[in-house]
Amino acid sequence: MNQKITIRDVARHAGVSVATVSYVINGVNRVSEDTKERVLEAIKELEYRPDFTAISLSKKQSKMLGVMFELEESGSISSIFYENPYNSEFIRGLEFVTRNNGYDVLISGVGKPDDYKNWITKRNLDGLIALGPFPQNVFKEMETLSIPIVLIDKYGEYAKKYHNIRIDDERGGYLATKHLVDQGHTRICFVSPKLTIHNPVDNKRFLGYKKALNESNMSVDENLIFEIKATSLEDGYEIGKKIMEYSGEITAIFVTADILALGIIKSLNEHGKKVPKDYSIIGFDNISISSYMTPALTTISQDIFNKGVVAGQTLIDAVEEQISHPKTVNLPVKLVVRESTKKI
Amino acid sequence: MNQKITIRDVARHAGVSVATVSYVINGVNRVSEDTKERVLEAIKELEYRPDFTAISLSKKQSKMLGVMFELEESGSISSIFYENPYNSEFIRGLEFVTRNNGYDVLISGVGKPDDYKNWITKRNLDGLIALGPFPQNVFKEMETLSIPIVLIDKYGEYAKKYHNIRIDDERGGYLATKHLVDQGHTRICFVSPKLTIHNPVDNKRFLGYKKALNESNMSVDENLIFEIKATSLEDGYEIGKKIMEYSGEITAIFVTADILALGIIKSLNEHGKKVPKDYSIIGFDNISISSYMTPALTTISQDIFNKGVVAGQTLIDAVEEQISHPKTVNLPVKLVVRESTKKI
DNA sequence: ATAAGGTTGTTAACCGGTTAAGCAAAAGGA
DNA sequence: TCCTTTTGCTTAACCGGTTAACAACCTTAT
């Protein structure tokens, strides 16, 4: 390979010192128009491209942001991460804004306790986005990190220390349930990951579910709460079977992720049940395929791309010290009625 | 932040020189067991983590691999990239192997001609994977790059200079068409991106389509070739409308991507047509949702995760100089029969 | 005329690692 | 015994940038 062009080559070519070249590149106002032009000329002629690695080392910032989420035992990024287009769409929004600001994004998972800290330190990441659920202890570990952190869809005490981007989950839960209630349903399943203190997102949605029921003088029937292990097609399918095994009456299902709805519907179909004839079903997220399924899925829509954009912008602002105090952004949700729900 | 622990801290703490510490870390066999132990001890005590940035600078290798693909005009990564789970699944396989080898992967798009070269140089990427279609001139540009390159699903003269991972596209096209022919179909649509010299993948699949028809004494009817612009739900939907507008007879459809099939089916349904009653449809790729759609999609399956793994391993081998000459791997395809096709 | 300040540029240390070269002491060979 | 190797460790230059400190020159004010 032909030798790499360095800042020293440029300096020599322009007849100035390396410092001057550096100043020109960084827009430091210490150089005369005259020399600035000569330097710029040299840069162009030599096709000089500053080396990020060297810049990182001396400036102690890498122009790289990390995205962290749960990891499989295998050490592989959870297939669920990729299976659910929600995450892909988020990343797309994120990269849109980071790219336009000269940042690259690195994706990793939370594996062994110390792993991701290692990763952050080694790669000199400038900031971190925490996506998806992970064990509580990770948050404790995070405190020792000295880079800005943006949490996605997190609630709780620990979350207060960081920046937060989330949607109005309670309202989402409420809108979904209300829609079903308005259509005359009274036996409405709630399907979500386990409702624990560690899962406040779904707790909030559950709160909305409960609120809508209560408003119509109904109460939560514990038998209608179904728990999935992970947000995947497979898990949706499995929970669909469970629902089919239930002996009581069910006329509608509220699932906290569109992707789960797909799995559930397959299950129902295999049992000879039709949506929305036999069951109304409403999802959450409004991923792109939702409108292409048959039947098209009624769902609670959130602008996931935009969520990624806001998260990215917030993190960059924090990294570049435009903001210092923890900032929380609440994004709106709305009901999108399609074909999977109908009046009873 | 508490000062970063550097190799000099470790050296001081262990009472040796930095060189010795470096040798210990890199397993250079020049250090006595005794001092090695002291150094290791110091590393542990101080929780020292070598800085990749510094390593990159001096070793001139970044332990980062790039994934390059087409870019939207907006400068954003093509939404299609994320919309099609094919790509996500590939990346998942890729990251599985890179992660286990200490590499991180950076994703970018091909934007302005010079853009991605800039990116590669600036980030000191060790290797590159080229995914998805891009303009011919990019390949010419690539020649000036001095890092190993792995091409995914590429054919043609230019491809011979690089490593290639692909599947047996012709056989895929053949199997799909043969399946439909075996079921008694004679009026079979072929839906794919434009068949040009720049799109050899779909050309190969078309060859298989043609071969299967010819074997049964049928010939290609130009009217049954439908062209989509991009591999997206939206484009599938649009082409579905076109198919509905066609006045001649059609009983089956072969699409070169599952995601397109979803869009087409929606279109058909809106015109009151049912799959597989009115139309048999077969896809390509076997993405995860294919088996969860209604009807479940008959398709040509390729192991996309594995494709990512093989691509990653090949690139790493090339980077680490385990292989020098261009290597080509052909992965198998197979027919997966589900519900979207039936005997006429 | 001189001090003070602004403008434009250079020198050299530094970021945190790697590694060629050098050197002393121990081991091996004649 | 003396010379050559080997072993074990250190010194210092280097990777490609940034930036504090300094210097020379040119204005302007007093």
Image (tube, coloured by chain):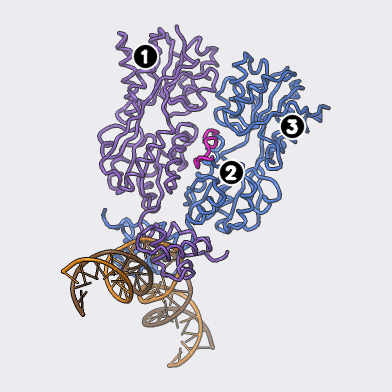
Chain colours: A purple, B blue, C brown, D orange
- The alpha-carbon separation of the residues under discs 2 and 3 comes to 24 Å
Q: Residue at x 38, y 64 (%)?
A: A32
Amino acid beneath label 2: Leu
Residue, disc 2? B131
Q: Mark 2 and 3 residues: CB-CB less than 8 Å, in contact?
A: no
Residue A131: image location, x then y, percent: 39, 37
Question: Would you say B136 lies left or right of A226 here?
Answer: right
Kindly identify which chain the residue marked by label 2 belongs to: B
Residue, disc 3? B209
Q: Secondary structure at mark 3?
A: helix
Question: Would you say C13 lies left or right of A85 here?
Answer: left
Residue B77 on the magenta segment: yes
Q: Residue at x 29, y 43 (%)?
A: A323
Up the image or down, B143 lies above or below B312; here it is below
Between B244 and A216, the one lying in front of the other is B244
Q: Which residues are magenta?
A: B73-84
Q: For the C terminus of chain B, give its image quadrant.
A: top right
Question: Would you say B89 lies left or right of B31 here?
Answer: right
Residue, disc 1? A178
Q: Earlier in the sequence, mark 2 or mark 3?
A: 2
Q: Which mark is residue B172?
A: none
